[in-house]
Image (cartoon, helix red, strand yellow):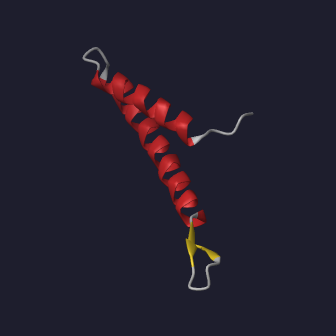
Amino acid sequence: MKKQTLEDAFAQLEAVIERLESEEISLEDAFGAYSEGMELLQFCNASIDTVEKKVLKMNEDGGLDEF
């Protein structure tokens, strides 16, 4: 099984938003899409947090420290 990337999650999130914006979506399907979208958002937020923690900053000695 392929690990989901942040880019994949954003693409899926766009598809969910399009479904939710559809005038033909049923209330039940809208709740399902909303739930799926929230899970994708949680994944995206966690992925972004992980990347932010790996960002390096330069210290006074010219070396790099994890941020």
> In the rendered view, does 3 fall on the left or right side of 6?
right
Compared with 16, 25 (above or below) is above
- Count of labels in the image: 0
Q: Residue farthest to the top?
A: 24
Asked if one can make out residue 67 in the rendered structure from this viewpoint, the answer is no
Q: Residue farthest to the bottom?
A: 60
Relative depth, front residue between 7 and 61: 61
Relative depth, front residue between 7 and 16: 7
Q: In which quarter of the image is residue 27?
A: top left
Q: In which quarter of the image is residue 13?
A: top left
Q: In which quarter of the image is the C terminus?
A: bottom right
> Residue 62 location in percent, x, y?
61, 79
> Residue 35 location in percent, x, y?
42, 38
Asked if one can make out residue 9 in the rendered structure from this viewpoint, the answer is yes
Residue at position x 32%, y 26% from top? 20
Q: Residue farthest to the front?
A: 62
Q: Quadrant of the N terminus?
A: top right
> Residue 47 location in percent, x, y?
55, 52
> Residue 3 location in percent, x, y?
68, 39
Compared with 57, 25 (above or below) is above
Relative depth, front residue between 41 and 52: 52
Compared with 26, 40 (above or below) is below
Compared with 24, 50 (above or below) is below
Residue at position x 57%, y 64% from top? 55
> In the rendered view, does 62 fall on the left or right side of 28?
right
Residue at position x 44%, y 45% from top? 41
